[in-house]
Image (spheres, helix red, strand yellow):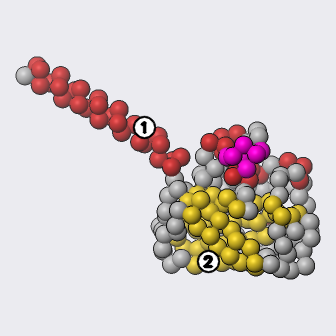
Amino acid sequence: MRKRTIVSTVSALAASAVAAPLMLASPAASHGFVTGPASRSALCGNGTVRNCGQIQWEPMSVEGPKGYPSGGPADGRLCAGADGRWSPLDDPRGGNWPATAVTSGASTTFTWKITARHSTSTFRYYVTKPSWDPTTPITRAQLESTPFLTVPYQGAKPAALTSHTGTLPAGRTGRAVVFAVWDVADTNNAFYSCSDVTF
Ligand SMILES: [Cu+2]
């Protein structure tokens, strides 16, 4: 009897030892981020940009409340999905984030690395207005009110490597930020991503 008790205690310990790392691992294993044109998360995750804080370890985790623009993250907290852990993504860094060259009015492909394939409503892509000041955090007023690209999924799950192609607005010069929104269908959350580009 005594021996049985010891054996079952040991198995319970073994079971919890297995379960704990899995529970810790799941947040980092989830979600997704824009790899091209490189998002701020991607640049922090691959070491191109330093002093990013925790986002460097999990660039795929910029998740916040959905409902942009009527809901969602507050102005000035859009790039971090209003998650304080990722607030360095909202820091304009004096307008000096590395920017990917894009062509105004041309077809452009946006690529996500997706590590958890959530059932999806839409992917939406917004760009800053020509009047945007790159030295200030991004607000709704600084973004075009209509996405230049909307991709409906109707609940389907995106592939691990997902690409969407759309046409950037014509007649643009200088720096801009593409603000990408991945609306998850079956949770209250969305993923947010800011990519600095230069026309
Ligand atoms: Cu996820």
Q: Residue at x 74, y 53 (%)?
A: 40
Q: Which residue is mark 2?
A: 151
Q: Residue at x 47, y 40 (%)?
A: 24
Residue projecting furthest to the top: 2
Q: Is residue 170 visible?
A: yes
Mark 1, secondary structure of its residue = helix
Mark 2, secondary structure of its residue = strand
Q: Nearer the viewer, residue 42 or 90?
A: 42
Q: Position of residue 160 (x, y in %)?
A: 53, 62
Q: Amino acid at mark 1?
A: Pro
Q: Position of residue 33 (x, y in %)?
A: 63, 58
Q: Position of residue 51 (x, y in %)?
A: 76, 39
Q: Residue at x 68, y 68 (%)?
A: 110
Residue interval drawn in magenta: 43-49
In the image, residue 1 above or below residue 104: above
Q: Position of residue 31 (x, y in %)?
A: 55, 56
Indicate which disc, 2 or 1, sits on the residue closer to the N terminus. Answer: 1
Image disc number at residue 100:
none
Quick one: quadrant of the N terminus? top left
Q: Nearer the viewer, residue 16 or 173?
A: 173
Cβ at disc 2 under 8 Å from ligand 1: no
Image quadrant in which you'd find residue 75: bottom right
Magenta stretch containing residue 118, yes or no?
no
Image quadrant in which you'd find residue 132: bottom right
* Disc 2/disc 1 C-alpha distance (Å): 36 Å
Q: Which residue is mark 1?
A: 21
Q: Amino acid at mark 2?
A: Val
Magenta stretch containing residue 46, yes or no?
yes
Quick one: label 1, few (<14), some, or many (20+) residues within 10 Å?
A: few
In the image, residue 144 above or below residue 5: below
